[in-house]
Amino acid sequence: MVAKAQVDIGEYQYGFRDEEDYVFKSERGLNRKIVEDISAMKNEPEWMLDFRLKALDHYEKRPMPNWGADLSGIDFDNIFYYIRPTENMGRTWDEVPEYIKNTFEKLGIPEAERKFLAGVGAQYESEVIYHSLREDLEKQGVIFLDMDSSVREQPELVKKYFGTIIPYNDNKFAALNSAVWSGGSFIYVPPGVKIEVPLQAYFRINAENMGQFERTLIIVDEGAYVHYVEGCTAPTYSTSSLHSAVVEIVVLEGGRCRYTTIQNWSKNVYNLVTKRAAAYKNATMEWVDGNLGSKVTMKYPAVWLMEEGARGEILSVAFAGDGQHQDAGGKVVHVAPNTSSQIISKSISKGTGRSSYRGLVKVYKGAEDVKSNVVCDALLLDETSKTDTYPYIEVEEERASIGHEATVSKVAEEQIFYLMSRGLNETEAMSMIVNGFIEPIAKELPLEYAVELNRLIQLEMEGSVG
Amino acid sequence: MSSSNGVVKAPMFEIENLHAEIDGKEILKGVDLVVNEGEIHALMGPNGSGKSTLAYVIAGDPRYEVTEGSIRFQGEDILEWSPDERARKGLFLAFQYPTVIPGVSMANFLRMAVTNVRNARAEESAAVGGDVQKITPREFRRLMREKMAILKMDDAFATRYLNEGFSGGEKKRAEILQMALLEPKMAVLDETDSGLDIDALKVVSEGVNNLSGPEVGMLLITHYQRLLNFIKPNFVHIMMEGRVVESGGPELAHELEAKGYEGLRAQFAGTRAG
């Protein structure tokens, strides 16, 4: 059964799946009743149901995007939009159903939690099945909840910010998420609280043709700091699944938020995500966005620099192997004067893989003395792989310093030969060159994730040469 | 070649009638050369005579195609071996122009190279009941620091990216460091002296002299006699137009210094014509 459901596409090691034993599984396809059912099952307030229904309406009217990656392989009527695996969320791993716990054990989450995390959220299909936060942080007033609970438990904060950074009508997939969202994280960090070790969320899809639509909202209050990390995997199926998340972040005066993603979906997942942050006076927002998995990714983490002194940084690394299209990049919008930003994008393409950098730097009129720098480097590993670049720069203000450089390079035969002449085999040589190429981004990651990133690249490289 | 007890022993490293071409153009036109354990050979010759090509072919550079002849190392034909196999068996080439590998620190690169080569040697040794051990990370760090100190390299060097932003002298030193750590049985040094000031030349020569010993063969490729003031070769060969045209003792280098390549060229042309 398990073996049958999987297709052999190489080294992906998270492609295993569990037998389904669910409390609720919606029928395939999307309609108004499913949206109402989701809202009812979650005991939501009226305003949230209204929000969902307005979003559904917009989603149905809005045409598919006519730019970016090829999305024609998504069969929207074949997707399961809501699956509730279990009745209750665990506060300890022992409260989580055995088979789900085992899956997260295999993914190394409880171990990572014990070793170096301040808190963990684990989502399985549509629901967060486990959530924890270190006690000392809870005492300091940090709130780390699954999004569903926060609607009930933190109505004021949620109502104030939910859907304000990314409105339901922002784009077709944000509208879809707004209609059927379930799970995700809610974080509030009180003024001056700096969380030194990361909070992590892990997203797991299990069922075939699953649609996962988590929704995350992070509020970093004045002078506070948080580093949030998310990881994701899914079983390998021959048919498509859909992951379409919305992430909204607010960083208030002097605060800093770093959001790191190591996306490693199986190669049958369409990953269409909207992520956006608003940074206020002297605040800093940093996106570290690693895209290794999925069939197609379209994701451009954005920072809106709303007040003076705000800074935005986007580090993006993408690996497009056989059959993958990584359409990634970042957007920075300078609304206020004296704001600064940097986008560094590194992409690697191999075999029939294609990576596209798509980015925007926008400077509004009146945003004087803005500094922005964009660097995008693409590395091609062979003759068949492809890369392209779509850098949009819209500057309405004369006093702005905008830098942009882009390079495309191929792994040079002489580099491979040099390393091989020192006893490295061809795969090791290639991996070393690729890991060196992404080093400027890997060194920004906590050690554990840098090691993981290097290891994933190594796996991608195996069997790719010779 | 016979040893004192009369048993005939194969040379450690033997090139025979080697022909090689790049993009259809023949560069090596029948090279013959023998290097035995403990011997240092200098290979001299004018620009374009094929010295560097010979070095690349020995290391297994895929850009070159060997069309005729053989290279035998410890009795085995190495031409079918990949460059990494050659390295693991104990061949080493110090590059004239080492390649930059951005983002890869010297330490990471050296650890992998030394581990691969040393572990291959340990396996080989175990197969014949020898006692060469695999290297531990701790031992590697100790070894790296020790060799860097000998080459007067600052500790910070280990964290720099491989050859990136290195001065000419630093690149050469890094090559010698790699050689010192990999402990080859047969080392080819391609113009390791070029671009070095006298102090750097001394340090690099010392590194080479440290490695040389009764079990190691060396081939120093050089354009100038200068290096040979610091490293004493047992044999000197002159290469011209893709062949070794003259071999002799150290005096040959001095003769070359006196006459220049043009003088020798005329002499060989005369010899051949006669």
Image: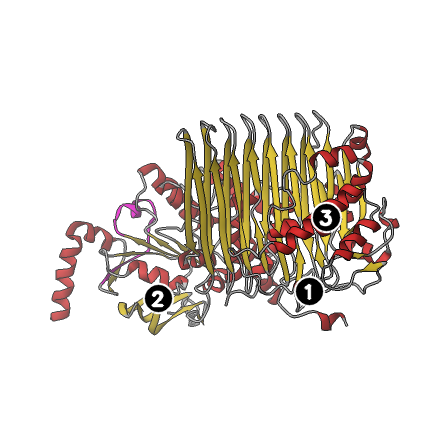
The image shows residue A318 at horizontal and vertical percentages of 55, 52
Q: Amino acid at mark 3?
A: Arg
Marks 2 and 1 belong to one chain = no
Marks 1 and 3 belong to one chain = yes
The image shows residue B133 at horizontal and vertical percentages of 61, 56
Q: CA distance from mark 1 to mark 3?
A: 19 Å
Q: Residue at horizontal 66%, vertical 58%?
A: A242
Which element type, helix, strand or loop, lies under badge 3? helix
Q: Chain of mark 2?
A: B
A425 vs B57, nearest the viewer: A425
A368 vs A316, nearest the viewer: A368
The image shows residue A404 at horizontal and vertical percentages of 42, 41
The picture quadrant where one finds residue A319 is bottom right
* Up-down relation of residue A116 to residue A104 (above or below): above
Q: Which residues are magenta?
A: B223-240
Q: CA distance from mark 2 to mark 1?
A: 57 Å
Label disc, if present, on residue A116 of the rendered structure: none
**Colouring scheme, one of rainbow, by chain, secondary structure, one colour:** secondary structure
Q: Amino acid at mark 1?
A: Asp
Q: Chain of mark 3?
A: A
Look at mark 1 in the image and give the residue it sits on: A77
Q: Quadrant of the C terminus of chain B?
A: bottom left
Q: Few, some or many C-alpha atoms within 10 Å of disc 3 (few <14, some 14-19, many ≥20)? A: many
Q: Residue at horizontal 73%, vertical 43%?
A: A185
Which element type, helix, strand or loop, lies under badge 1? helix
